[in-house]
Amino acid sequence: MQDYQAPADLLKDRIILVTGAGSGIGRTAAKTYAAHGATVVLVGRTVSKLESVYDEIEAAGHPKPAIVPMNFEGAAVKDYEELAMTLEDNFGKLDGLLHNAGILGDRSPVEMYDPETWNKVMHVNATAPFLLSRAMIPLLRMSDAASVIFTSSGVGRQAKAYWGAYAVSKFAVEA
């Protein structure tokens, strides 16, 4: 078996939006996309983390990324639509969208689960990706080869005690 090595310019001239870009999978994905030539739109709720990723991408000599601070917990439909207009004005299209942002919430028996926390987890992990995708579809259609990717978790595929809203939200994005 041979290991695949992506060409350095595989994503040259591509615009890719990454949610949850400040840490973990989102950070690694954003840096990897940039290393392969993409202009990355870094979206997340913690500006200092986004700035750190931005600085690493720039220091490596990759295309200059963009930072969009957004907390999906409080974002409304108009926020997603405004983001789409901003991207259209600045880039004219969107080639990729990685839905990676998410929150865990409580790990407790469902009868003890706080309804407000349930709603926050479901909103960030399931509703926000729907709203963001919906707003970005016109820009994705302007690409000659657009992709939308959802990250998930094994918790979404197996019933596990006390994983509540997180497990339900991850199953929702896989369904």
Image: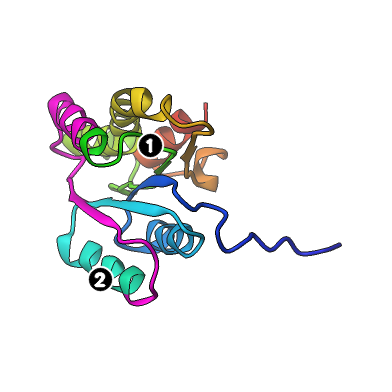
Report the span colored magenta: 59-86
Point 73% across, 60% down: residue: 4
From the image, tell me which residue sits under label 2. Answer: 52
Q: Is residue 130 above or below residue 96?
A: above
In the image, residue 72 lies in the stretch drawn in magenta: yes
* Labels 2 and 1: the sequence-earlier one: 2
Residue 41: percent from left, percent from top: 30, 50
Pointer 1: residues within 10 angstroms few (<14), some, or many (20+)? many
Q: Which of 102 and 8 is in front in this view?
A: 8
Labelled disc at residue 80: none
Q: In this view, does 109 lie above or below 67?
A: above
Q: Nearer the viewer, residue 99 or 38?
A: 38
Q: In this view, does 139 lie above or below 124?
A: above
75 left or right of 112?
A: left
In the image, residue 125 lies in the stretch drawn in magenta: no
How far is disc 2 from disc 1 in space, using C-alphas?
23 Å
Point 21% across, 40% down: residue: 72
Q: Is mark 1 on a helix, strand or loop?
A: loop
Point 16% across, 35% down: residue: 116
Amino acid at pointer 1:
Leu
Q: Which of 75 and 96 is in front in this view?
A: 96
The N terminus: image quadrant: bottom right
The image quarter containing residue 125 is top left
Residue 67: percent from left, percent from top: 22, 54
Between circles 2 and 1, the one closer to the viewer is 1
From the image, tell me which residue sits under label 1. Answer: 94
Amino acid at pointer 2:
Ser
